Amino acid sequence: MEPQDQSETPQSRRITRAKLKKRSNIRFGISLLVIAGLVGSSITLILTNPTSYEETEPTPFPITVPTRVPFEQPTAAPTSVPDVVIAASAPLRLEIPSVGFDSANIVLPAGQTETFIKWTEDDNRAHGGSLVPPSPYKSSLVYDTTVPGGGLFGTDAQTSGLIAGHTSRYDRPESEQGVFQPLIEVDEGDPVAITTANGKLCYNVITIDSETPKNGGVLIDDVLVSAVAAKYRYAAPIPGVVYIVTCYRPDVNSTGPTTENLVLVLQLNQGVTNAGSC
């Protein structure tokens, strides 16, 4: 057993117990402060960081509406495009696509250099005023310069143009049949193109005449000419109009002489001519 400390007295023991009690009170006070602090901190956390979720309305996505620019009426009418002008001159090529006719495909016989032959007043006098395209039948087309105004072809022409060619009897060999044999198949409205040195002219068939007598007794300048010549060759000129004339044979078996002419009346189509699409 340890020896007892002789220095400890009753008074010193009382002081020691008082110190211990004071320390205990201090510890208790500190514990209360710590607990209070923890409680305060918990309250603070609860207030600043709530555990419940409160749903809020989403922010709408912004929609941009384009600004509408008001339409402004033009201050002046647009300038119109002028019509194409093709100066009047002689025909070089005739095309009628609906019946497969193209004068560029005509085979010229030996000695003939031009498909289109000019018909003059000298030719009129030599044939008694009648328009008679020369033979051979298959290769001769004439354009008549004896009609009023000279008979040239163009958008600015102040005359009527006239082109003539043969239609022969169907009992002839094909090589001897007339160059205008296919014209019997042409219909009103069909397009026709005439090319000159100055450009391409576009027409449409507006009338088909097969009832005008080929022979007759019409006096023109004291010359007896056919009814069709009086009606078309010497008619008052009509700008933009072209006549294509041949003999009329309504039946492929026709072998006798013809008594009427077939005349296609063409009207210039300026709009198609402008486009150059005929």
Image: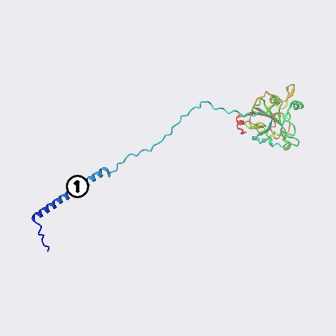
Q: Quadrant of residue 272?
A: top right
**Disc 1 residue crowd, few under 14, some 14–19, many 20+, Cα 10 Å:** few
Extreme-front residue of the structure: 7
Extreme-top residue of the structure: 222
Q: Secondary structure at mark 1?
A: helix
Q: Quadrant of residue 35?
A: bottom left
| Type of amino acid under label 1 | Leu
Q: Is residue 54 left or right of residue 210?
A: left
Tell me which residue sits at (14%, 60%) in the image. Answer: 18
Between 45 and 112, the residue placed more toward the observer is: 45
Q: Quadrant of residue 89?
A: top right
Between 154 and 4, the residue placed more toward the observer is: 4
Q: Is residue 47 left or right of residue 206?
A: left
Extreme-bottom residue of the structure: 1
Picture coordinates of residue 220, whole percent (x, y): 85, 26
Which residue has dot 1 on it? 33
Q: Give the answer, above or below, for where 277 lies relative to 76.
A: below
Q: Is residue 35 left or right of residue 69?
A: left
Picture coordinates of residue 93, whole percent (x, y): 79, 39
Quarter of the image with the C terminus is top right
What colouring does the structure picture have? rainbow
Tell me which residue sits at (87%, 27%) in the image. Answer: 223
Tell me which residue sits at (31%, 50%) in the image. Answer: 48
